[in-house]
Image (cartoon, rainbow, N blue to C red):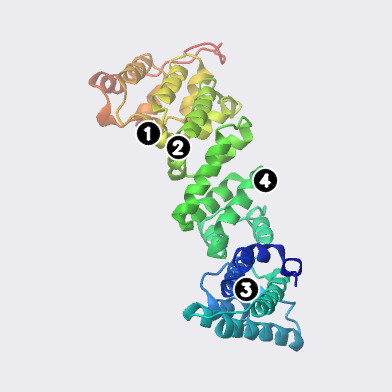
Amino acid sequence: MNLETRLPALLWEAVRQSYEKRDFTGAILDGTYFLSELLRNKSGLEGDGAALVGQALGGASPKIKLNKLQSESDWNEQKGFEQLLRGFYQAIRNPRSHEKRVDTEEDAQVLILFVGLLVRQIDQAKAQFSREDFVKRVLDPDFVPQRRYAELLVGEIPPGARMEVFLDVYRSKDSWKIEPMRHFFEVLFEVLAEDEKRQAYEIVSDELKIADDESIIRSVVGVFTPEVWSHLEEAARLRIENKLIGSMREGRFSVTEKRCRSGALGTWARRHLSVFLLKSEALAALYDRLSSKVVEQEDYVFEYFSGSLPELSPKIPEHFDRLFRARVAEGHQRFFNAVYFYEVWGKDNWSDKLKEAVANFKAKQPSAFLDDDIPF
């Protein structure tokens, strides 16, 4: 008998080496190992043997459904197949795992063909958890942007399917909405195994090493937590941080239009400044904007980064202190607001001269002819 032509291709690959060596008992066991792994993958469960069969095929809501389960006949088929599989493990697999057996080639052919029948039935069955359907729910426009909703969704993913779900959702980044995905991935990373996290970090890092599409960069930077960012490969982080800083150097914000006129990509850096590798470079880019004496460039920092400056330097740098006290002394309201009301870097870090400038502040009246490129 040509066993290869009568078996599913993957099952034959699983048993071929033992079978061709005429280790027929080993080939039978290889077939049962393949069957167990198929059950685990299809159901998303762990475990083995009869217990795995009961969890996957038994109960009122089986993980693996052989049919629609809408009639008594459907349920009889489901229960019968479950009992058949339980019997196979108890009568065929277990004795060969626990004691020495010597099977003939004919034994192996009959039993492996039977495993092939079981494999085909399971392959054709409908799993209760469908990754395709689940990803649609994650990308649903009505995804509730709350951690609790994300916890409920992630809780539905079988442990064995979590990495595949990560890959499916990550590949769908063109359809992401930032806030819902931020909640989803934050919760998902909390339940991924350590080796799965490392694989995810590698996948994201590899993409960021070559990504030039701002929408991809914006999505990845906006969705993943600083914790994830800190575990990405250094080359990927440096490259993207450099891109973000380059955007920050061009930043302009119009107060009258209430919109970012340039440097929009750079604003996505705010979430990760605390774990930036290029903190000094980011700080220098923001200082250039603040010291430009161009209103829109200054407002870019006030609008997006004034509360984030301490994440780049825990104490106020001397050149920032000099800049703030000079502009406050000149009567510039926005600089005064930043240090007095928002306490950039905190009053305890100010120099005595900056404290004095704030205490003696007198607002300067803006020019009637002021425009975006005329300094205060």
Q: Position of residue 329 (x, y in %)?
A: 34, 15
Residue 222 visible within the image:
no
Q: Is residue 25 left or right of residue 237?
A: right
Q: Give me the disc on residue 175.
A: 4
Closer to the camera, 34 or 81?
34
Q: Is residue 135 above or below residue 212?
A: below
For the residues labelled 4 and 1, the Cα–Cα distance comes to 31 Å
Closer to the camera, 289 or 47?
47
Nearer the viewer's eye, disc 1 or disc 3?
Answer: 3
Structural crowding at the residue carrying mark 2, measured as other residues with C-alpha within 10 Å and reported as few (<14), some (14–19) or many (≥20): many
Q: What amino acid does circle 2 point to? A: His
Nearer the viewer's eye, disc 4 or disc 1?
Answer: 4
Q: Position of residue 360 (x, y in %)?
A: 29, 19
Q: Disc 4 on helix, strand or loop?
A: helix
Q: Are marks 4 and 1 in contact (CB under 8 Å)?
A: no
Nearer the viewer's eye, disc 2 or disc 1?
Answer: 2
Of mark 1 and mark 3, the one earlier in the sequence is: 3
For the residues labelled 4 and 3, the Cα–Cα distance comes to 29 Å
Q: Are marks 2 and 1 in contact (CB under 8 Å)?
A: no
For the residues labelled 2 and 4, the Cα–Cα distance comes to 23 Å
Residue shown at 26% from the left, 20% from the top: 356
Residue shown at 63% from the left, 86% from the top: 83
Which quarter of the figure is the N terminus placed in? Answer: bottom right
Q: Give me the disc on residue 272.
A: 2
Residue shown at 34% from the left, 29% from the top: 313
Q: What amino acid does circle 1 point to? A: Glu
Of mark 4 and mark 1, the one earlier in the sequence is: 4
Q: State the residue position of label 1.
A: 311
Q: Are marks 1 and 3 in contact (CB under 8 Å)?
A: no
Q: Give me the disc on residue 63.
A: 3
